[in-house]
């Protein structure tokens, strides 16, 4: 407890799933949390944190809007006195429409939230940190889909590959500032984005097969991604910068293979 004591964290996509788990965890570790989401449920997340003795404020905003992101950073500073951590976690999947059936508008919508939204968070958070001379931590949610094909549609995968590159290039652009920028690449996690997949599997009685391609042979939980973010946000990760941290049960450690039976 207390790994983020006295720090301020801004988390987008905090109304559910990974962002909600992180908002609760960061607050429990002592941070003042600005929980941001375009869904009104983010207000309930903040209220629950406050009811449990934590410090939080909810803000309904669009992570892909420059004005909204700038306002969120200003709100975090005005409310909690500074900004030490920014997690650009908000994202949309765009479904699995075949590439040749997609339009430019489909791509623009996904890139606006997933990649441009991450850029805006990095830009405005780093500007605030530079002004205050804060050696902060900026985190972006990428995906194993950004590492190679097979984990998402083409625009989603491209957007997440872009997020990984953004973390790397931003870390270099901010050299000498003390600001660290890293990405997290989750595997299959049960969130609002993936809920239909989990619901269909439960309806068919095939829930046990979810995540069967990774060595742990299970899907992940939002808190398991939030724990990685806590590490990156904390001083424990003071020498970790420009990295894409993969949290996928080992899925991306291998090329696809036909697996033999479980070892006895």
Image (cartoon, helix red, strand yellow):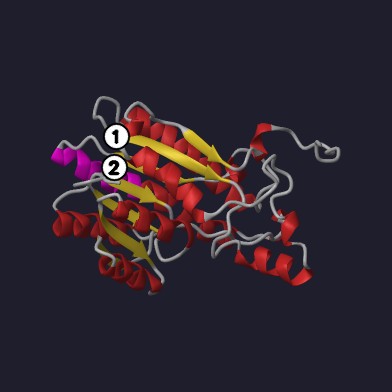
Q: Specify which label sits upstream in the sequence, 1 or 2.
A: 2
* 101 lies above or below 142: below
* 198 lies above or below 171: below
Locate residue 199: give its quadrant.
Answer: bottom right
Residue 196 location in percent, x, y? 64, 68
Residue 73 location in percent, x, y? 24, 54
The foreground one among 115 and 239 is 239
Crowd around label 1: few <14 · some 14–19 · many ≥20 (10 Å)? some
Task: Kindly state the secondary structure of the residue where label 2 is placed.
Answer: loop
Residue at the spot 30% in from the left edge and 65% down from the top edge:
49
Give, as a single range, the part of the protein colored magenta.
121-132
Locate residue 161: give its quadrant.
Answer: top right
Q: Is residue 13 visible?
A: no
Most distant residue in the front direction? 264
The foreground one among 51 and 243 is 51
Tell which tag, 1 or 2, sits nearer the viewer.
Answer: 2
Badge 2 is on which residue?
Answer: 3
Task: Kindly state the secondary structure of the residue where label 1 is placed.
Answer: helix
Residue at the spot 69% in from the left edge and 61% down from the top edge:
97
Residue 60 location in percent, x, y? 33, 69
Q: Which circle marks residue 91 in the picture?
A: none
Residue 254 among those drawn in magenta: no
Which of the image's four quarters has the C terminus? top right
User: Disc 1 and disc 2: Cα gap in Å?
Assistant: 8 Å
Magenta part, dominant SS: helix
Q: Are marks 1 and 2 in contact (CB under 8 Å)?
A: yes
Badge 1 is on which residue?
Answer: 235
């Amino acid at each position: 407890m207390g790994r983020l004591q006295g720090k301020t964290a801004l988390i987008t996509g905090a109304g559910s799933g990974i962002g909600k788990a992180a908002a609760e965890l960061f607050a429990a570790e002592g941070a003042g949390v600005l929980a941001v989401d375009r869904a009104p449920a983010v207000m309930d997340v903040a209220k629950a944190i406050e009811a449990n003795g934590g410090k939080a404020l909810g803000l309904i905003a669009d992570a892909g809007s420059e004005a909204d992101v700038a306002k969120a950073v200003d709100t975090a500073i005005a409310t909690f006195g500074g900004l030490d951590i920014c997690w650009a976690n908000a994202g949309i999947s765009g479904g699995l429409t075949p590439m040749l059936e997609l339009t430019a508008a489909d791509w623009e919508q996904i890139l606006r939230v997933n990649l441009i939204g991450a850029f805006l968070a990095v830009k405005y958070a780093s500007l605030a940190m530079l002004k205050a001379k804060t050696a902060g931590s900026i985190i972006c949610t990428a995906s194993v889909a950004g590492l190679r094909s097979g984990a998402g549609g083409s625009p989603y995968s491209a957007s997440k590959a872009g997020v990984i590159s953004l973390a790397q290039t931003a870390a270099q652009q901010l050299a000498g500032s003390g600001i660290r920028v890293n990405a997290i690449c989750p595997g299959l996690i049960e969130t609002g984005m993936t809920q239909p997949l989990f619901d269909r599997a439960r309806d068919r009685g095939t829930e046990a097969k979810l995540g069967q391609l990774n060595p742990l042979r299970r899907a992940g939980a939002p808190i398991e991604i939030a724990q990685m973010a806590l590490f990156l946000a904390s001083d424990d990760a003071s020498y970790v910068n420009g990295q894409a941290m993969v949290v996928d049960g080992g899925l991306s450690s291998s090329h696809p293979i036909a697996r033999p039976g479980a070892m006895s």
